[in-house]
Amino acid sequence: MEFSMLFITLLVLQAISPSQASIQAAPAKSDLFREYIGAEFKNVRFTDVPVNPKVEFHFILSFAIDYDTSTSPSPTNGKFNIFWDSDNLSPSQVSSIKNRHSNVKVALSLGGDSVGNASAYFNPSSVDSWVSNAVSSLTRIIQLYNLDGIDIDYEHFHADPDTFTECIGQLITALKRNRVISFASIAPFDDDQVQNHYLALWRKYGHQIDYVNFQFYAYDQGTTVPQFLNYFNTQSSNYNGGKVLVSFISGGSGGLSPADGFFTACSKLKSQNQLHGIFVWSADDSKADGFRYEKQSQDLLAIPH
């Protein structure tokens, strides 16, 4: 009896092992390319940016901010206004680029570093009022522009991490539940206050966050390939289970630049099935260089495993 049961068990294990092995060996999908656009009013248009049909491409409009549009902008407690170059990046142009390229989606980013000549602060009056205002105002903008997702890029805070967590977490949850958006990302960088807020959000609402646009270009200029890979491992551990995207800044003013080994690092990660995608700040600055590194990024992402 014991021998028969052992024999049957071995047959069952042998039968399921190949499929299990193939599942474990399946590479992670790593063909996502994302680019921020419109923050610097340099007359860049979606059609200026090369789109490789073999990648998943996200434009990220920068920025929607909950400040008024006066000459000295003030916080509006979740009532968002458009602060990107809407003359060149209009609703009709969103529809046009999406119709032209079936692999293109368009998102908007919230917050950013500054508004007018001052820092843009996350500054809610209360969780409930901020969430209510944000859901209403962003739903209007997202539907007007036929957008697909949101990105969270607040970098300055007049609220504690718990308040930030509930405001942003409830916002993303509501927009997804209402089918207003299909994806959400966050854009932290290696700063104590920033990380305290975003890691608190990640711990409670990480299941609602599809991508982590980590700003690796916020590290020192002259970052080496080994340092970059170490930073990637550290942030992948911090945002455990998340799709942490690698990044560079146009002009190479910070982090590991394309001219100094960024694509070497990407190839290394791709060979280890750890490259979840690449994003760039920003199309506005890349326009002068003919989007050279955007093309190279997408070519790399399009290479099959």
Image (cartoon, grey):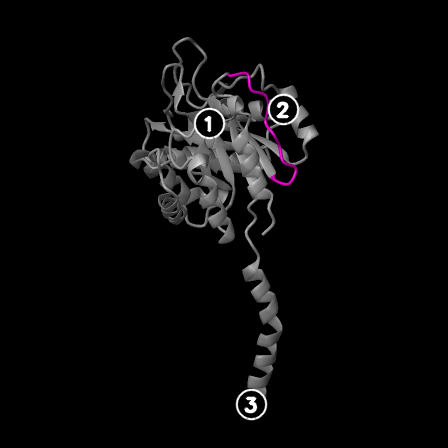
Span highlighted in magenta in the image: 42-55
Q: Which residue is under mark 1?
A: 110
Single out the residue that lies furthest toward the top.
Answer: 71
Identify the amino acid type marked 2.
Thr
Q: Which residue is under mark 3?
A: 3
295 on left or right of 194: right
Q: Which of marks 3 and 2 is nearer the N terminus?
A: 3
Task: Give the CA separation, mark 2 to mark 1.
Answer: 23 Å
Residue 47 is marked as 2
Q: Residue 123's x, y, as percent? A: 36, 24
Look at the numbered disc 2 and give the secondary structure of its residue: helix
Look at the numbered disc 3 and give the secondary structure of its residue: helix
Q: Which residue is drawn at 45% across and 35% down?
A: 259
Q: For the residues carrying marks 3 and 2, which lies nearer the camera in this image?
A: 2
Q: Residues within 10 Å of mark 2 (few under 14, many from 20)?
A: few
Q: Residue 113's x, y, as percent? A: 39, 24
Q: Which of marks 1 and 3 is nearer the N terminus?
A: 3
15 on left or right of 67: right
Single out the residue that lies furthest toward the left.
Answer: 192
Is there a contact, CB below 8 Å, between mark 2 and mark 1?
A: no
Identify the amino acid type marked 1.
Leu
Q: Which residue is drawn at 58% across and 61% down?
A: 23
